[in-house]
Image: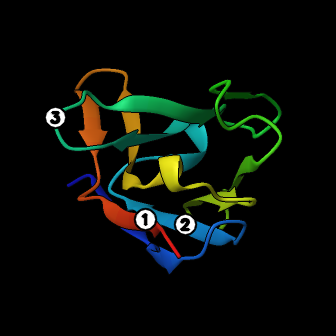
Amino acid sequence: QVQLVESGGGLVQPGGSLRLSCAASGFTFSGYAMSWYRQTPGNERELVATIRSTGGSTNYADSVKGRFTISRDNAKNTVYLQMNSLKPEDTAVYYCKTRLLRSGDYWGQGTQVTVSS
């Protein structure tokens, strides 16, 4: 079955960096776009970044442009989110997501990122 497992979250000071990973299984990873979302309590999930199947095209929310970088390693079935210059407003639960052709959206369990001094 499809599984997405995030890791790499934690507590970091403002201005610091974290790299999130999402390990995928159960589908042909190299054939699908992958996205990172984030959610804070009481709010809907916000799209942070998307990378196309070959990794040649990426898109970012305006709030993270120039600070976050999404990448993927199709040999390892893993998508990454490198987060630099972190701000307190980046604090959220971060989720990876994919949309498969016939079966719809799949989400990971999420990883908490807290930016605080």
Q: Is residue 27 above or below residue 101?
A: below
Q: Which residue is mark 2?
A: 20
**Can I make out residue 77 in this image?**
yes
Comes first in the chain, label 3 or label 1:
3
| Identity of the residue drawn at 27% across and 30% down | 105
Measuring from the top left, give residue 8's x and y in whole percent: 49, 76
Instruction: Please tell me how crowded label 3 is: few (under 14), some (14-19), or many (20+) other residues with Cα within 10 Å.
Output: few
Name the secondary structure under disc 3. Answer: loop
Q: Is residue 52 above or below residue 25?
A: above
The type of residue carrying mark 1 is Val
The type of residue carrying mark 2 is Leu
| Identity of the residue drawn at 72% across and 48% down | 68
Measuring from the top left, give residue 61's x and y in whole percent: 62, 26
**39 or 72, which is in the foreground?**
39
**22 or 61, which is in the foreground?**
61
Look at the image and tell me in which quarter the N terminus lies: bottom left
Instruction: Please tell me how crowded label 2 is: few (under 14), some (14-19), or many (20+) other residues with Cα within 10 Å.
Output: many
Name the secondary structure under disc 2. Answer: strand
Q: Which residue is mark 3?
A: 42
Q: Is residue 60 above or below residue 7?
A: above
**90 or 103, which is in the foreground?**
90
Q: Marks 2/3: CA distance?
A: 23 Å
Q: Quadrant of residue 19?
A: bottom right
Q: Marks 1/2: CA distance?
A: 9 Å
Q: Marks 3/1: CA distance?
A: 16 Å
Please state which of the two labelled residues, at mark 1 or mark 2, is closer to the viewer: 1
Comes first in the chain, label 1 or label 2:
2
Q: Which residue is mark 1?
A: 113
Name the secondary structure under disc 1. Answer: strand
